[in-house]
């Protein structure tokens, strides 16, 4: 039986998109902006159920609440917000999730204004109406294009996000620089799980700021390294994503290492079937880990930088 991965990545249904969008669609990944090399913008944020939420105006909308999520390949908006701003439909994509597939319409013409710093993705997607119950507390999701548009610094202690123009950004701190590679639009880093009296367990991990947990580990990786047995006490749990739910057990691995930084006992979801990532990857790293640091997301230089939170 084929295993279904849990990830929230969004893949273009190419025939539909080309048929409906051949004239007007921009090159994927491109985006327009009103740039100023000296423009640095600070934005307060709040945590909602463990996720980073910021306020933004979309075209002429009142302030909207959107989530920062490196796990989304395209920026998403609530269908009601799309309708209120009169965005132009430009095709359709297929969202592949943990228990099936869902169709989402694609739209053009959205500009996000963060107090003077703007982001104009070539397209945004709207979740279907039957998924709106999952969007009750947010108006959208800022995906990979947002992180490519800016160098994004998240200061969890101050609850402040700083947006820098990539070409003008210079880092002069003493944080841990962790290089990453892209898998499609998602950053991937090498990390290590440290278990006493065992050799270090190294794997490739996707960075997923939309996950409120610490680590989410795929069932193959969990079984191969007998991680549930080494975690001590675990509890039955589950994860919800596009397409449905999947069963997990929740516990804590003793230690997780990124570069030279060691994170003690991160909250961990051990998938009992399927995976949050593709075959060959260990899992993903979520906000319960990143909340322990001031984090610089520098996609232009393919690195994240971690400074311990004060």
Image: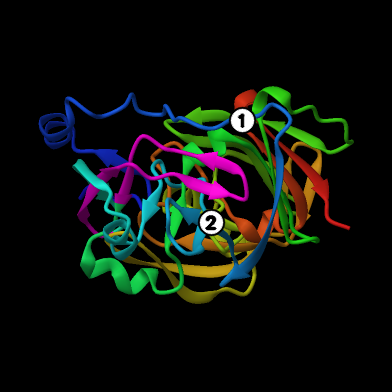
- Classify 245 as above or below 8: below
Mark 2 crowd level (few <14, some 14–19, many ≥20, 10 Å Cα): many
Identify which residue, 199 or 154, lies in the foreground: 154
Which residues, given as a range, are shown in magenta? 99-125
Can residue 7 be seen here? The reply is no
Q: Is residue 213 magenta?
A: no
Residue receiving disc 2: 56
Q: Please tell me which residue is depicted at 77% across the width and 43% down the height of the picture.
A: 306
Q: Is residue 101 magenta?
A: yes
Residue receiving disc 1: 180
From the viewer's perspective, tell me whether residue 106 is left or right of residue 255: left
- Give how far across and how far down residue 291 sits, in percent: 71, 58
- Give how far across and how far down residue 201 sits, in percent: 64, 43
Picture quarter containing residue 176?
top right
Q: Please tell me which residue is depicted at 50% across the width and 59% down the height of the picture.
A: 66
Identify which residue, 25 or 11, lies in the foreground: 25
Identify which residue, 142 or 116, lies in the foreground: 116
Can residue 142 be seen here? The reply is yes
Figure label count? 2
């Amino acid at each position: 039986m084929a295993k279904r991965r849990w990830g929230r990545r969004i893949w273009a249904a190419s025939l539909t998109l080309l048929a409906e969008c051949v004239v007007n669609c921009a090159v994927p990944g491109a985006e327009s902006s009103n740039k100023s090399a000296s423009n640095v913008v600070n934005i307060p944020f709040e945590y909602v159920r463990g996720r980073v939420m910021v306020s933004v105006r979309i075209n002429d909308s009142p302030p909207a609440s959107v989530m920062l999520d490196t796990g989304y390949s395209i920026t998403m908006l609530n269908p009601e917000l799309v309708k209120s701003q009169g965005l132009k439909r430009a095709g359709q994509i297929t969202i592949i999730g943990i228990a099936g597939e869902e169709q989402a319409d694609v739209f053009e013409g959205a500009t996000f204004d963060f107090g003077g710093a703007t982001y104009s993705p070539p397209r945004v997607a709207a979740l279907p109406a039957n998924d709106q119950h999952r969007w009750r507390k947010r108006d959208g999701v800022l995906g990979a294009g947002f992180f490519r548009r800016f160098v994004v610094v998240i200061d969890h202690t101050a609850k402040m996000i700083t947006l820098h123009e990539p070409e003008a950004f210079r880092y002069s701190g003493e944080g841990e620089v962790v290089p990453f590679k892209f898998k499609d639009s998602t950053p991937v880093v090498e990390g290590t799980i440290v278990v006493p009296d065992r050799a270090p367990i190294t794997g490739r991990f996707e960075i997923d700021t939309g996950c409120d947990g610490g680590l989410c580990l795929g069932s193959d990786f969990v079984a191969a390294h007998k991680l549930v047995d080494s975690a001590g006490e675990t509890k039955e749990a589950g994860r919800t994503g596009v397409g449905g739910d999947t069963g997990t057990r929740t516990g804590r691995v003793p230690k997780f290492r990124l570069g030279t930084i060691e994170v003690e006992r991160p909250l961990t979801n051990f998938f009992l079937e399927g995976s949050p990532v593709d075959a060959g990857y260990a899992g993903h790293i979520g906000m319960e880990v990143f909340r322990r640091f001031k984090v610089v997301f520098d996609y232009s230089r393919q690195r994240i930088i971690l400074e311990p939170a004060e």
